[in-house]
Image (spheres, rainbow, N blue to C red):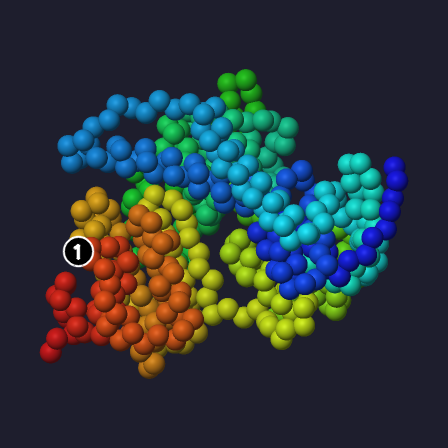
Amino acid sequence: MSCKTIHTQVVVVGSGPSGYSSAFRCADLGLDTILVEKYSCLGGVCLNVGCIPSKSLLHIAKVIREAKSLADVGVEFLNPVIDIHKICTWKNKVINNFNFGIKKMADKRNINVIFGSAKFLNRNSIFIKGKTEDIIIAFDNIVLAVGSSPRKLSYVPSNDSRIWDSTSALSIPIIPKNLLIIGSGIIGLEIATIYSSLGSKVDVVDSSSNLLSHLDRDIVKMFYNAVSRDFNIFLNSEISKIISNKQGLLVSRSIDNNNDIQETKLYDAILVSVGRVPNLTSLGIDKIGLHVNNHGFIEVNDKLCTNISNIYAIGDIVGQPMLAHKGIHQGHIVAEIISGKNHYFDPYVIPCVLYTDPEVAWVGVTEKTAIENNIEYESVVFPWSALGRAVASNYSNGMTKLIFDVKTRKVIGGSVVGSNAGELLGEIGLAIEMGCDVEDIALTIHAHPTLYESINLSAQMFQGTITDLINVKVK
């Protein structure tokens, strides 16, 4: 196979949200840019086997649940007929449209897109193993955006098609009668939401003692009370054995982390969802002396530069949170830095959303982190049972919670549980980034009836001007 050498100012390895955003911004800033992608289509995990397909399926799940909930108010539908083939066709159409759009935007920017796997030759060049030809790319700067992969468990059989990771689960190979999900993180809970809506009986098992341990307990309690009607969550429980046979997957698990107390159950499929690991094994970073931390992530400074001055890293490979929007922002920052601008990555907040039903969304400081950092704070909670739009839409099972710094009277955090909770984070995140006082939110007129007015009402509670609830601050 032939091998040629080309030179570029910037090469970006990985075409997920972090990578293509960085490449596009580099090109817009006038830099000669090459984008390298290992797989046959652009978009990375997020577009092809992650964020977008999961949200497509979660939309279907939400519609099914909402249709069922209308029986309580006098509207009943027949049980839905689930056509896996049509669902996957629609999901793939959504993905393909974005694939096409990304490639078209790359072409419009005159970005050279090369498909193949990359490996460092030295600190200034990489070797690309392509399908039709091998290429050596000599570069001035390189941006690593190669993403992450599902973490594997050693005790789980690796050669059984009924044992899934998130990628295979989102392809909807079957709708299992009984589905076990190992891991109660965001991915596991979202897939539990999908399959329980499609008709599976779902058990979520986790060895930890707390569900969503980084969130405040009142938020988690409301979430748990809602989803426990749809699927089971077993904490303090470890899988001790999995036996594959023709009838299914026979699973033994401990109860209350006591191996002397075991429960055995037969499942049709198992999803392993215990986190993700950075895709660094094939890059040859050891050869060039690139530093990684104790958790296996690439070490970077606030300019997203590694210990090698012309090598940058962004997205999942630099650590938590492993979120597309974090990586996109990092991609833009890196492009600005390479072009000579004095920019750096130091956000006040990075919003997070759990796209279950109900959704859970949070940004900034929680009560837990406020206590850990000795911040004098006050939290206020506005219940959606008093929120006109929520009650009228049959969404009253929700809450909006804001955290205020008592000394500065600024909002420093917020959490929301409820339908479309993620859509409320924009105002809260912007308020934190801009250093808004409580008055800025409380005195801004919000449309009524809406879900987002709960942010305004929460601010009124802290301010002591609330009229939609009993005002406990009235003297």
Q: Residue 345: where, in percent of width, then height?
A: 57, 69
Looking at the rendered structure, the kind of residue marked 1 is Ala
Q: Is residue 392 above or below residue 160?
A: below
Report whether 72 appears left or right of 163.
left
Residue at 54%, 17% in the rendered image: 246
The residue labelled by disc 1 is 386
Q: Nearer the viewer, residue 215 or 450?
A: 450
Residue 149 x/y as whole percent: 61, 45
Q: Nearer the viewer, residue 33 or 49?
A: 33
Residue, x 50% and y 45% (percent of image)? 51
Query: Where 454 falls versus 279 (above or below)?
Result: below
Name, please, the residue furthest toward the top: 246
Can residue 37 be seen at all in this image of the molecule? Answer: yes
Which of the image's four quarters has the C terminus?
A: bottom left
Front residue of 97 and 276:
97
Element under label 1? helix
Q: Is residue 13 visible?
A: no
- Residue 53 relative to residue 73: left or right: right
Residue with the most extreme bottom position:
407
Q: Residue at x 52, y 26 (%)?
A: 173
How many residues crowd around disc 1 within 10 Å: few (fewer than 14), some, or many (20 or more)? some
